[in-house]
Amino acid sequence: MGIAEILQKYGQNYAMAIFETLSMTLLCFVIAMGISIVVTVMRVSPIKPLRLVGDLYVQIFRNIPGVALLVLVAYALPNIRIVLPWKTCVEVTVVLLASAFGSENFMTGINAIGVGQIEAARSIGLTFTKTMQKIVIPQALRSAVLPMTNLLIATMLTTALGSQVPLNPQELTGLVSYITTDSTGLGILPFMISAVCYAGFSFLLGLLGNHIDKKVRVLR
Amino acid sequence: MSTQTPVIELRHVDKHYGDLHVLRDINLSVHKGEVLVLIGPSGSGKSTLCRTINRLETIDSGEILIEGEPLPQEGKALAQMRAEIGMVFQSFNLFAHKTILQNVTLGPIEVLGMSKAEAEARAMELLRRVGVDAQAAKVPAQLSGGQQQRVAIARSLAMQPKAMLFDEPTSALDPEMINEVLEVMVELAREGMTMVVVTHEMNFARRVSNRVVFMADGQIVEEGTPTEFFDHPKTARAKDFLDSIRGH
């Protein structure tokens, strides 16, 4: 069977898998961004326990392999009576990983701002919250566009963890396992199709990231 | 000097950085309309002193009073007080992601609750006063150092402060830009602004200030009118310092 036949037989499955991969990516990335902002604000807050919790969160989830984390979420959480649907297990795993890395990206952005602007904000009477809202977060967001583009791509690739649990419909990597079991003798062709999809979307996201970065970059 | 409550008053202020005693029993009053210049060798504590006045630096003991009220420790009350004391930094510290106009309107809109239209109208007037109104739509990185510092002064003025602190405002500037900033400060002094200025600009100190405070090793060593201090310094420390900056 060549590519044409594979696509004819499994085209519908690929279309659904693409939708699954992209929708999971989008959902996970948006939630991860929200969590990374919260975690980052904790990490720079004047309250020490908050800083510790934020740092701990990042250290834990940045340093556990995705598969191991998925195993914990999918097979360890039921021991404390938390049984999540398979897809949710994957999404929780991806969000935990992405938010830890996202917070690191924001921290880099914040460190680039420098204490001077923060002192200036305080000296015109802005409170901690307002200084965060008006000075720190906007600049951290803007200077984090390129690293966050990389993180978005990494998030998409990490949704391939979905291949390790039974999903229906499957995402792009899980689908490959399904196809190679369903029809024998296809070699790596089904995988290549998925790989081209991943690469294509990564490329487009990269372009989009560069475009946004050029528009919002903070001149220094 | 007037008998009114001083705008800024420090009583027995002490501060340590670890073993280093950076401020030793500082007692100082600044009255309305007074221009006080803090000078001294580097490491003498003059910048630290300036920064304690709006609590960018905490103190270990003593009291700081603003119009007779003790400086709040933290939170909203502290933010409120800071809004009333302008601060100009050595490194300008303009908000890099905001336009020049937005730099000046941010405080009035967010802290004073002014409408955007009113804040912009007033900001443009202030920018005109310091001569950078033509740059209003640019971002800080597109301006020269002298222009940025004048914007920083306008940003402080927009808060209608009771007093302004200048922490070495010309030290980071190229020589040809120093005067444009000093001129703005001279103008402010003439209009009666209460000012505390940490500076190495002796001509400015001589021409504009009402009182010179000389610090060394965290202490106020000598204070007096500019004429007294520059022409007849009383202490050996002050004489040595004046000799060294005059290039003897």
Image (cartoon, coloured by chain):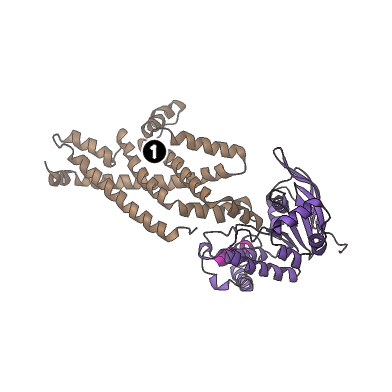
Chain colours: A brown, B purple
- Which amino acid, mark 1? Thr
Location of residue B24 with respect to B33 vertically, above or below:
above
**A14 w.r.t. B100: above or below:** above
* Residue B111 image offset from top left, x and y in percent: 65, 60
Residue at the outermost top position: A79
- Residue drawn at 42 percent across, 52 percent down: A145
Q: Position of residue A210 (x, y in %)?
A: 37, 55
Q: Residue at the right extreme? A: B3
Q: Secondary structure at mark 1?
A: helix
Q: Answer with the quarter of the image where residue B108 lies.
A: bottom right
Chain name for mark 1: A
Answer with the quarter of the image where residue B117 lies.
bottom right
Q: Residue at x 24, y 43 (%)?
A: A194
Tell whether position A40 is magenta: no
- Residue A24 at least partly seen: no
Q: Which residues are magenta?
A: B99-113
User: Which residue is most to the front?
Assistant: B248
B148 and A200: which one is in front? Answer: B148
Which residue, given by chain and number where applicable, does mark 1 sit on?
A: A88
Q: Can residue A122 be spotted in the picture?
A: yes
Disc 1 packing (10 Å; few <14; some 14–19; many ≥20): some
Figure quadrant of residue B69 = bottom right
Q: Is residue B40 left or right of residue A57?
A: right
At x 60% / y 51%, what residue is drawn? A129
Image location of residue B202, percent across then percent down: 72, 62
- Asked if residue B52 lies left or right of residue A53, the reply is right
| Residue B100 is inside the magenta segment | yes
Closer-to-camera residue (B229/B46): B229
